Image: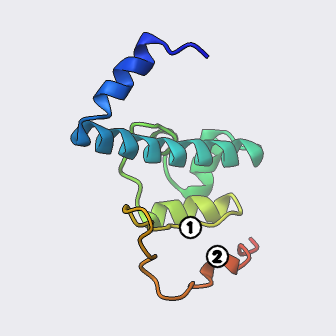
Amino acid sequence: MKRTNFDQYLDEQLQDPAFAARFEQAGEAWDVALQIAALRRKAGLSQKELAKLLKTSQQQISRLESAGYEGHSLSMLRRVAAALRSRVRVVFEPIENGAENVAETPTGYDKKPCPKQ
């Protein structure tokens, strides 16, 4: 596939460590937003309906589903997950190649079924 001018520009920009860090952080926020929106749609809910379940505003749900929003609290993510019959899983990964995981042994929390509502 032919590389575009944007591809070349992005490659150049990613050489700057500060830009690369911001770019990666934006991707993480995008992942969260996409997952929330996809789970909500799969549940057949509008933003307004999800907001009502969570006793919050439609605007707050819109923010949570926005790629530019970085104010996600763990407690709000847990509330959203429970309403959408899902769970939140946070994983810390080593930055260095070949580095060991921080936890000595797996926690096993990822094996728990989601709670029934």
Q: In the rendering, at what x and y percent does residue 12 appear?
A: 31, 25
Residue at x-position 74% and y-position 71%: 117
Q: In the rendering, at what x and y percent does residue 17 appear?
A: 24, 42
Identity, as a three-letter code, of the amino acid under mark 2: Asp
Q: Quadrant of residue 115?
A: bottom right
Identity, as a three-letter code, of the amino acid under mark 1: Arg
The quarter of the rendered structure image containing the N terminus is top right
> In terms of depth relative to the viewer, which is nearer, 23 or 100?
100
Colour scheme: rainbow
Horizontal side of 103 relative to 95 (left or right) equals right
Q: In the rendering, at what x and y percent does residue 55 appear?
A: 53, 56
Within 10 Å of disc 2 (Cα), the crowding (few <14, some 14-19, many 20+) is few
Horizontal side of 51 relative to 17 (left or right) equals right
> In terms of depth relative to the viewer, which is nearer, 51 or 3?
3
**In this figure, which residue is indicated by the disc labeled 2?**
110
Q: Residue furthest bottom?
A: 105
Give the distance between the C-alpha atoms of the residues marked 2 and 1, in whole angstroms. Answer: 7 Å
Q: Earlier in the sequence, mark 2 or mark 1?
A: 1
**In this figure, which residue is indicated by the disc labeled 1?**
89
Residue at x-position 56% and y-position 13%: 2
Picture layout, residue 48 above or below residue 52 = above
Q: Tell me, yes or no, whether the two marked residues, 2 and 1, touch with CB atoms within 8 Å.
A: yes
Horizontal side of 16 relative to 60 (left or right) equals left
Q: In the rendering, at what x and y percent does residue 42 appear?
A: 76, 45
The residue tagged with tag 2: helix, strand or loop? helix
The residue tagged with tag 1: helix, strand or loop? loop
Figure disc tally? 2
Residue at x-position 62% and y-position 42%: 37
Residue at x-position 51% and y-position 60%: 77
